[in-house]
Amino acid sequence: MSKTYLVPLTEIRREQTVVNSRFIATLAPAFSIEEARAFMKRIREEFADATHNVPVYIIGGGNTVTEYFSDDGEPSGTSGKPALTVLRGSGLGDAVLVVTRYFGGTLLGTGGLVKAYTEAAQSVVNAVERGQRVPVHVVMAAIPYNLLERVRILTSKNHGKILGEDYAGDITLTLQFPVENFENFQTDLRELSAGKIHAEVIETKEEIVAVG
């Protein structure tokens, strides 16, 4: 279930000017082709008056990817392909990038365009915070009030987080742990409660967590 490739944590934008042409690069996470297309549409609408909106995306990661690029009216091979090459070389997956260009009146030539689109793509790829898909368990446990603070400490110790606390006769905690840390938490919980308390897994899913 775990995927080891990195993904953008957030949407990011950078702008630069090359011989009076404005290049605005916007990078975002996208976990399906549909999400990537929706992002591309949103950027095209935001910059509807731009000369070009050059889109690229990589959905998936590692050896299983779907890639796409378009030159959006720029000379063939001068924009989309260089931007995709940067994205591919970044190690990021599940990422969509649009480089918007406002023509400044001076032709850049084939080499100039390749350089400008490459640098625009690099500006966001190099700056974006990165995350990684991690499989997690969502679990529930009923605990007595007198153990609450110690269970909170055990949760933090095992890289978990508290999603909810329901106060009744006991406290029902909803917790989340990376799968690899959950058994250690169970062991700690059994030791704390002399074997009386057990956390039940109610869901297993993936979450994006920051790295580096």
Image: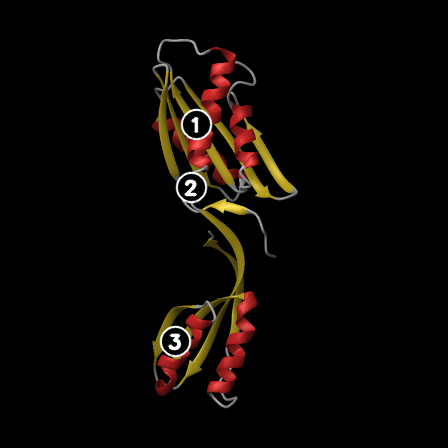
Numbered mark located on residue 128 in the image: 2
Real-space Cα distance between discs 1 and 2? 13 Å
Nearer-the-camera pick, 153 or 44? 153
Would you name the residue on which mark 1 appears? 120
The answer to whether 95 is drawn above or below residue 193 in the figure is above
Q: CA distance from mark 3 to mark 2?
A: 32 Å
Q: Could you tell me which secondary element the residue under label 3 belongs to?
A: helix
Q: Which mark is residue 184?
A: none
Q: Are marks 1 and 2 in contact (CB under 8 Å)?
A: no
Note whether 175 is above or below 124 in the view shown.
below
Find the residue positioned furthest to the top: 106
Q: Residue 77 in the image: x percent, y percent?
A: 56, 18
Residue 61 falls in image quadrant: top right
**CA–CA distance in space, label 1 to label 3:** 45 Å
Quadrant of the image occupied by residue 145 = bottom left
Side of 64 relative to 120 (left or right): right
Tell me residue 14's x, y (percent).
37, 32
Residue lying furthest bottom = 194
Amino acid, disc 3: Arg
Q: Which numbered mark, 3 or 2, is in the foreground of this view?
A: 2
**Residue type pointed to by label 1:** Ala
In the picture, the quarter occupied by the N terminus is: bottom right
Residue, disc 3? 152
Amino acid residing under circle 2: Val
